[in-house]
Amino acid sequence: MKKIIAFTGSNNPNSINEKLVLSILKKYPGQNIEFIDLKDFNVPIYSQEIEQNGIPKQIKKLFQLFTEANAFIIASPEHNGLPSAFLKNIIDWLSRIDQRIFCEKPVLLLSTSPGPTGGKTHLQILEKLVLRWGGLFVEQYSLGSFDQNFDKNNLSIIPPEENEKLKIALQAIMSGVPLTKKNNVEVVKDYFNSFQNGNMEQVLNSFHPDCYIVSVKEEERSKEELHGIYRTQEEAKQFLNNITALFNTKDFTVNHISSAGDHLVMANGTFSHEVKSTGKLFNSTWAQLCIIKDEKIKEYRFYEDSAALVVASTL
């Protein structure tokens, strides 16, 4: 059976990242996951002068444990947007034996914090470093709002959806195969394909549960009004219902989709809607901006010729 080493990058005896790791050991006792407490490997801050006296025995022992492992789970606290100095020091010492300390083996990155992002920002940095250190990055998982989402007495994550996300991440480390993810442009392309095929259930699933939608104008609206602000996936459903209630779509063409940054996707095209109340055609160019998070549309802004809609809606 695959042997997985799990450890945290924290030297805090009350580390919440350690609690997150221990919750995994408790929930998956048969998966041969071994917790290593790096606090037991007490070594000085790395310096070339100290290294002249030799690599500390503790580091040699830890390196041997690394060579015997088949995969790694690392729970890393975020300190000022970066991995902890404690973790970095351990890695600095290990890399003096072999810089590629993970020996091409799978690595799963975890983090948690009292804040809503769960320390996720620094995992993007750590992901790149793991590759430099010889690891095969397979996935990352962050638990935000630790105090609200974690039962410290039972060492367990409370929200079912968070347990499901962690389960998927753990499946990646068990299999040793990185999860296949859509890039941001692919997320938007799938959204358009679903819309053009009339699959409104898939269209709705393209939106993040906590999405923010602006249809033409960033103003509050009445429920049946098309243009205005929609919040959450539930209101995204209302947005789609308003579109289908008002129009029969005759044509919807996507001319261009492109990435405009780490999370932003821009698109434009043309459409032709028949206004149901008048039978007139509402023809317009359109532009769309999307911010993508977790392979979902987190923020959506859609702009069209609202004056042409007024004309097409007038008897």
Image (cartoon, rainbow, N blue to C red):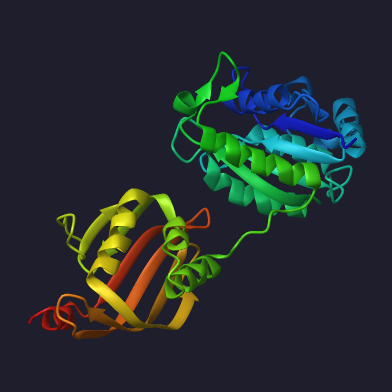
Instruction: Work out which residue is located at the far top of the displayed protein and give it.
Output: 153
Coordinates of residue 256 in the picture (x, y in percent): 45, 83
Question: Of 135 and 95, which appears nearest the observer?
Answer: 135
Q: Residue at x 63, y 17 (%)?
A: 13
Q: Is residue 57 left or right of residue 232?
A: right
Q: Is residue 285 left or right of residue 12?
A: left
Q: Quadrant of residue 86?
A: top right
Quick check: can you spot residue 83?
no
Q: Does residue 145 lie above or below 299 as drawn?
A: above
Question: Of 189 and 121, which appears nearest the observer?
Answer: 189
Q: Is residue 3 left or right of residue 38?
A: right
Coordinates of residue 118 in the picture (x, y in percent): 51, 37
Q: Quadrant of residue 250?
A: bottom left
Q: Quadrant of residue 67?
A: top right
Question: Of 230 and 243, which appears nearest the observer?
Answer: 243
Coordinates of residue 174 in the picture (x, y in percent): 78, 41
Q: Residue at x 73, y 30 (%)?
A: 7
Instruction: Work out which residue is located at the far left of the displayed protein and give it.
Output: 315
Quick check: can you spot residue 87?
yes
Q: Does residue 297 lie above or below 15 as drawn?
A: below
Instruction: Assign the N terminus to one quadrant of the image.
Output: top right
Q: Residue at x 32, y 78 (%)?
A: 249
Q: Residue at x 47, y 61 (%)?
A: 202
Instruction: Assign the C terminus to one quadrant of the image.
Output: bottom left
- How many marks the image carries: the answer is 0
Coordinates of residue 297 in the picture (x, y in percent): 43, 59
